[in-house]
Image (tube, rainbow, N blue to C red):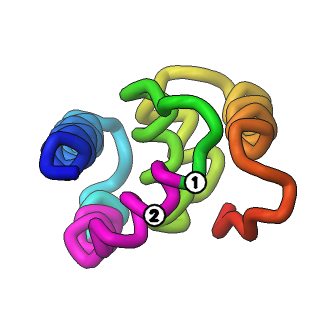
């Protein structure tokens, strides 16, 4: 359990770095970083435990962006992809969880 906690914290820090170095406007960066700081690790751990397959670091970072309610266009900017790719990732992520799981994204 402690290993998973450290893994999640590492991905949160990576997302924080991505946000800091992104081309988003400073006000938006501050708001997103605030939301990221307020994110409860227990919520993320519960989601990771519900996945049918282990989540890669990139998949976990995408989940974190969805949990802090980032706009699709902003997610696309920080990951350097187009918006359609973000929709595809969200769809694929949903497939990693059992059908009865209620996902927050």
The verdict on residue 34 being magenta is yes
Q: Whole-Å distance between the Cαs marked 2 and 1? A: 6 Å
Q: Estimate the x, y position of residue 21 in percent, counting from the top left.
A: 21, 35
Q: Quadrant of the C terminus?
A: bottom right
Give the answer, above or below, for where 44 lies relative to 3: below
The residue that label 1 is drawn on is 50
Q: Are marks 2 and 1 in contact (CB under 8 Å)?
A: yes
In the rendered image, the vertical position of residue 40 relative to residue 83, given as above or below:
below
Q: How many tags in the picture?
A: 2
Task: State whether the magenta stretch is mostly helix, strand or loop.
Answer: helix
Tell me the magenta residue range: 31-49
**Measured from the top left, where is residue 11 in percent x and y?**
26, 39
Residue drawn at (24%, 73%) of the image: 34
Residue 25 is at least partly visible in this image: yes
- Is residue 36 placed above or below 98 in the rendered structure? below
| Residue 33 colored in magenta in the image | yes
Quarter of the image where one finds residue 19: top left
Q: Residues within 10 Å of mark 2 (few under 14, many from 20)?
A: few
Q: Which mark is residue 46?
A: 2
């Amino acid at each position: 359990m402690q290993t998973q906690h450290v893994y999640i914290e590492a991905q949160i820090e990576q997302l924080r770095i991505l946000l800091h170095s992104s081309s988003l406007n400073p006000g938006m960066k501050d708001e997103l970083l605030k939301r990221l700081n307020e994110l409860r690790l227990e919520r993320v751990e519960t989601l990771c435990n519900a996945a049918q397959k282990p989540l890669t670091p990139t998949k976990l970072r995408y989940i974190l962006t969805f949990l802090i309610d980032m706009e699709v266009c902003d997610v696309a900017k920080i990951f350097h992809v187009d918006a359609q790719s973000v929709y595809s990732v969200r769809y694929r992520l949903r497939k990693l969880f059992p059908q009865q799981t209620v996902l927050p994204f």
